[in-house]
Image: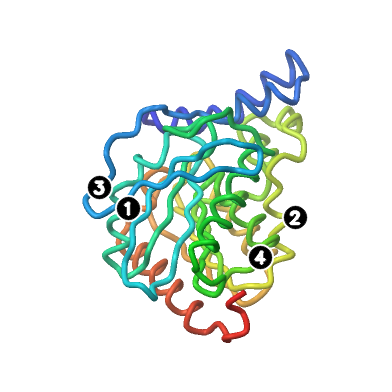
Amino acid sequence: MGERSRRRAGIVGAVVAAASLVGCAGMIDRLIFFPDPFVGDPPAGVLERWITTEDGVRLHAWWAPATPDAPVLLWSHGNGGNIANRADVLVALRARGVSLLAYDYRGYGKSTGRPSEAGVRLDVRAVYESERARGTPAARIVCFGESLGSAVTIQLAVERPCAGVVVVSPFTTLAEVARRHYGPLGGLAGNRFDALGAVRRLTVPILVAHGDRDEIVPFDLGERLFAAAPEPKQFLRVAGAHHNDVLDAPPLLDAIAAFARDVVVSQPASSSG
């Protein structure tokens, strides 16, 4: 397991240790996240944006525009690193005809503040509202989340109108991931990041993708999340992919871009919000 995999795997160990030793919800939230403060320059043609949340946190984001009428993927990343870790994927998806707005949660990269479950929910709402304020209709926004970001993304799509949802390496609940690694002690993670409860309330199409060799978030958790989602829905099994390399698969990037184009085109004019 590589360094990034070890850091991601630490979400469950950290949660269990914190709950066992101190029983402090705030400390557990802090230990879920593994931010990297260093972000280099954005790739060529990618612009920087700053977005302020309702509680005054300043978020750093990268905007990768395609054509003016392209779908806009609003990207919530995983629990480790920052937006720079997926710079190559951002460029590859833009080349496939979609625009992307990727942001760092509070405390990640150049964003101010300290991450928490409540905080990242404020963050994704602020990013969504900032894009709407720029004139992008809801019918062109596709909510896109990876790993921990899948739970953030699904919740956003329940609360705000959008064209569709894409989640990669998703889980059901954080506690379920913890149980797979630590047995009954995983239940100490509580009800944090309950993607399973949220996905049942979706009213837009969803694409779920998961690597079948994922060593951090077991593949069957992605299957269970998919089973609970209402139609219309699609599932893509990425053969041989692990947790950290799943987005290196060109067929997955092709599928994400195609799904985004399909759901945006299929939206009725009245859904532009």
Dot 1 or dot 4: first in sequence order is 1
Q: In x, y percent, where is residue 54?
A: 65, 43
Amino acid, disc 2: Gly
The residue beneath circle 3 is: 43
Circle 3 crowding by C-alpha within 10 Å: few under 14, some 14–19, many from 20: some
Amino acid, disc 3: Pro
Q: What SS does tag 4 mark?
A: helix
Residue pictured at 54% horizontal, 52% vertical: 127
Amino acid, disc 1: Val
Q: Is residue 72 above or below residue 118?
A: below
The residue beneath circle 4 is: 227
The residue beneath circle 1 is: 89
Dot 2 or dot 3: first in sequence order is 3
Location of residue 128 by image quarter: bottom right
Are the residues tagged 3 and 4 within 8 Å (C-beta)? no
The residue beneath circle 2 is: 197
Q: In x, y percent, where is residue 216?
A: 51, 39
Q: In x, y percent, where is residue 9?
A: 52, 31
Are the residues tagged 2 and 3 within 8 Å (C-beta)? no
Q: Could you give the CA–CA distance between mark 2 and mark 3, rounded to whole angstroms?
A: 37 Å
Q: Which one is nearer the viewer's eye here, 32 or 175?
A: 32
